[in-house]
Amino acid sequence: MKDYNMFMEDLASPKPAPGGGSASAFVGVISSSLCSMVISLTQGKKNYEAVQGELEKLSQKAQDYANQFESFMEEDENAFNAMMEARKLPKDNDDKKKHRENEINRTMKVAISVPWKIAQLCYKTMELSRRLCQIGNKNAITDAAAAGYLSNAAIESVLLNVKINLKSIKDEKFVESEKLKLRLFMENAKDIISDIRKIAEKELAI
């Protein structure tokens, strides 16, 4: 279990890492934990007998997601630090310059891959949130929907790190591929959050 008090202290410190990526993963922990709460509030309850088997499977998913998000908090910080170390490499001759440039590109691609892992897991958490809005305890629908809203915010936040790092990568094919991936991913995420909003607003008669 991560020491969240220490994480928050580090996040508020002048250190550049942990930053937005790790914070987004932390939001993922909160979101998946909210899903676990909704599941717990639905298990064993009258009128929800038909979904008890599915809830058991969803409960395991929610816990697995929380654990993965915790590991991504540290992974994102490590990826950023590695990228910063690459920038400190010597560049006093052509060979060293080339090595430094290669290391910067390599570590930046890793620094892009971790936010993608976080975003993809947030997407799965949004799918879980949507399902819980459909079958979960109606008294906890605001919590189920909040999990989806938080996951969506984390997606938008963490993918900012992908966008800013792409600006410094010289591999044009890689950059174009990532930009297309971003557009498609955000369109799909928009569809899910729209579903969650519709289900919640219908239930709340807003």
Image (cartoon, rainbow, N blue to C red):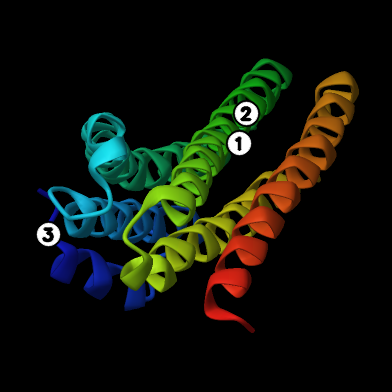
Question: Disc 2 marks which amino acid?
Answer: Lys
Question: Residue 54: percent from the left, percent from the top?
Answer: 31, 31
Q: Which mark is residue 112?
A: 1
Q: Is residue 61 above or below residue 2?
A: above
Residue 87 position by quadrant? top right
Q: What residue is pinned by disc 3?
A: 3
- Amino acid type of the residue tagged 3 in the rendering: Asp
**Spatial CA span between label 3 and label 1:** 25 Å
Q: Give the class, few, some or many, for how many residues have Cα within 10 Å of label 1's Cα (few <14, many ≥20).
A: many
Quadrant of the drawing holding the C terminus:
bottom right
Q: Is residue 72 above or below residue 100?
A: below
Q: Identify the element where label 2 is drawn.
A: helix
Query: In this image, 119 relative to 91: left or right?
Result: left
Residue 200 occupies which quadrant of the picture? bottom right
Residue at 44 percent of width and 38 percent of height? 79
State the SS at label 1.
Answer: helix
Give me the residue at 19% from left, 55% from top. Answer: 46
Asked if residue 152 lies left or right of residue 145, the reply is: right
The amino acid beneath tag 1 is Ile
**Tag on residue 109?**
2
Q: CA distance from mark 2 to mark 1?
A: 5 Å
Residue 9, given in percent of the width and then of the height, sits at 23, 74
Badge 3: how crowded within 10 Å, few (<14), some, or many (20+)?
few
Residue at point 62%, 19% (across, down): 99
User: Can residue 88 be spotted in the picture?
Assistant: no
Q: Is residue 176 visible?
A: yes
Q: Earlier in the sequence, mark 3 or mark 1?
A: 3
Residue furthest out toward the front: 47
Could you give the CA–CA distance between mark 3 and mark 2, rounded to whole angstroms? 28 Å
- Residue 37 pos. (x, y %): 22, 59
Residue lying at 40% horizontally and 61% vertically, measured from the top left: 27
Q: Which mark is residue 186?
A: none
